[in-house]
Image (cartoon, rainbow, N blue to C red):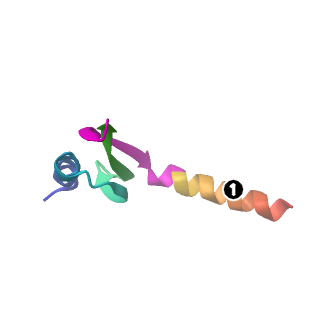
């Protein structure tokens, strides 16, 4: 199963069970992405799901910059 299929399966699973997936790593078109899939509830009823993506490279660069700032103090 390719990564895009896994993302779709996780989204379907979240819609079915309400289970959240956090910081799942995927390689899509040569980009390493972190994905979060969370259920959406209204009045205690599961009504949908949201899936977000972040570029892992950008996060790693930000962490390097932040750790470098701590060394300046």
Say which of 73 and 22 sits in front.
22
Say which of 9 and 17 sits in front.
17
Residue at 21%, 49% in the rendered image: 4
Name the residue furthest bottom: 71
Secondary structure of residue under mark 1: helix
Quadrant position of the C terminus in the picture: bottom right
Name the residue furthest left: 1
Say which of 23 and 60 sits in front.
23
Q: Quadrant of residue 32?
A: bottom left
20 within the magenta span: no
The magenta-colored residue range is: 43-58
Bin the neighbour count of mark 1 within 10 Å (Cα to Cα): few under 14, some 14-19, many 20 and up.
Answer: few
Name the residue furthest front: 43
- Determine whether, in the image, residue 44 is placed left or right of residue 69: left
Say which of 14 and 55 sits in front.
14
- Determine whether, in the image, residue 21 is placed left or right of residue 67: left
The correct choice, above or below, for 39 with respect to 72 in the image is above
- Determine whether, in the image, residue 50 is placed left or right of residue 59: left
> Which residue was labeled with disc 1?
66
Q: Quadrant of residue 48?
A: top left
- Residue 51: where, in percent of width, then height? 32, 43
Q: Main secondary structure of the magenta part?
A: strand
Query: In this figure, what is the number of numbered marks?
Result: 1
Quadrant position of the N terminus in the picture: bottom left
44 within the magenta span: yes
The correct choice, above or below, for 49 with respect to 3 in the image is above
Residue at 33%, 47% in the rendered image: 38
Residue at 29%, 50% in the rendered image: 28
- Residue 16: where, in percent of width, then height? 16, 49
Residue at 68%, 55% in the rendered image: 65
- Residue 61: where, in percent of width, then height? 58, 54
């Amino acid at each position: 199963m390719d990564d895009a299929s896994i993302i779709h399966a996780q989204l379907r699973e979240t819609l079915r069970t309400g289970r959240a997936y956090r910081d799942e790593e995927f390689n899509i078109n040569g980009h390493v992405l972190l994905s979060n899939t969370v259920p959406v509830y209204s009045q205690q009823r599961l009504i949908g799901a949201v899936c977000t993506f972040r570029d892992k490279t950008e996060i790693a660069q930000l962490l390097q910059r932040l750790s470098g700032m701590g060394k300046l103090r």
